[in-house]
Image (tube, helix red, strand yellow):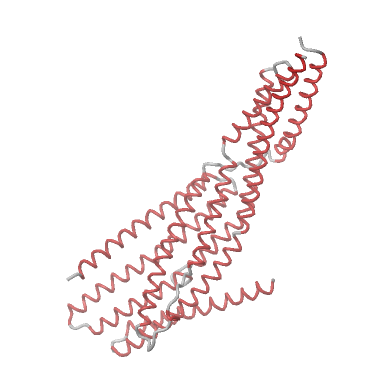
Amino acid sequence: MQSISSLRARGIVASLVGRLASRMLLPVALLTFATGCATAPDRDAIPAFRSGAATANQQLQTSFADINRFLRERQIDRAASLQSLDEEAFFTPLAPEDVAKWSRAFGLIDTYAATLEKILDPARRDEAEKALEELGNKIGEVRGEELPAGVAAGFTQLGGLLIQIKAERDALAAIRQADPSIQGVFDTMMTAIGADPDNGVRGMVGTSWGDVLGKIQVEFLGANGAAARRDVAVRFAATLDQRDAQDADLASLRRSLGLLASAHRELAAGRESDARSLIALIQDEYRVYRERMEALRKSSEEKSKENTP
Amino acid sequence: MSENIADSGQMNDGIRQLNQSLIAQHRALSRKLGKTTDMASAQAILLEMQEINFRVMISGSLLFKQTTAAIDARIQGVIEASNELEKSLKQLRRINDILQATSKFLGLVDKVLDAIKLV
């Protein structure tokens, strides 16, 4: 037999805990009314977005390193025609500290997307429901009676649902808050790469290929006989292909950034299936890029074998 | 501050125009080289192209630096959104922590009350 004072004390403690629980859940409950019609972001679209951004960053780092190597060779060609050799004739056009800032931007976008993924993790609702179930049992024990089964289960599910709604509401608010910046970052990156072969990094790479082609054109004028001229013409045509392939890579990289921006805009609008199909296109771009790079590598190897005596 | 931004915007436009003009000159020389049959003239054009290309690289490098600075400024919005998400994540974790702490507290209360009952 429990004493009356003990039963009273249990009742007071249980009542206080009940009030505390209702106070904790009240703000969350109010959010359900405020966000009843809000679109929930789909967690499954976020890993695909992260993977698309990682792919674009990887493609970008490789392309920028190749471009810097190629432009350094053009600086060496120019230096060979100078009267004196000076340090100022050499510099890295896509400065490492700038390329690192691009990488940092991708890193920050990934951190943001990873936090989104965490917040939308379904395990969060399960954990809350488990904690609520435990709390319900304890309240029952302190009161010295079992809560009705339906009430306990309903309390647990409602709590879990409220937690999920808060998570989804906060995630969508963050996606919408970040969207103008994400659009701005990708748009600026696209401008830097260049809308056509006469602009941005594409313009700088294009004129450098012009110098390589120019050298072959001069060689052509000095070649004796049709056979020698044909050899030079073959090299000229192969160099045109290399120029076009590098420009196509940069154009592909630019498209990938545009697709990432569109995918994020779709996420902000709550159209996750569109976001996923856009990200699938980025993976396609990267696949074509890798195939093109492989073809170029094989072509260079074959050429160097031909030139080996 | 706004004057600095306006100045940097004008400088950006100036460098972009210079870069565009150099690229156009380079293309024009390249076309001229394609029509030249005289070796000495061709070599002179090539040297001119290399000099112009070197300046395309310098202006292109400056443009790249400036657009990178714009990326760095625009990424701030993503950092702010990330911070909001972190706050929300902490709130959600806190709700769970409070629920668990309350359960533990109730377990303790139950033990104390049982002890009182025995006395």
Which quadrant of the view contains residue A183? bottom right
Horizontal side, residue A200 vs residue B13: left or right = left
Q: Camera-side residue: A37 or B72? A: B72
- Could you say where residue A160 lies in the image, as x and y percent from the top left? 64, 32
Which x, y percent locates residue B2? 69, 71
Rendering quarter of residue B89: top right
User: Can you say whether A70 is above or below A38 in the image?
Assistant: below
Quarter of the figure that contains the N terminus of chain A? top right
Q: Nearer the viewer, residue A260 or A146?
A: A146
- Residue at 41 percent of width and 52 percent of height: A284
- Percent from the top left, x then y, of residue A210? 37, 76
User: Is residue A249 toward the left or the right of residue B112 in the image?
Assistant: left
Question: Is the residue A24 above or below the residue A277 in the image?
Answer: above
Total count of labels: 0
A99 to the left or right of A118: left
Q: Residue at x 54, y 77 (%)?
A: B15
- Residue at x 38%, y 71% (from the top left corner): A70
Position of residue A56 measured from the top left corner of the image (x, y, whole percent): 46, 56
> Given the current orientation, which residue lies at the most extreme top position?
A1
State the quadrant of the C terminus of chain A: bottom left
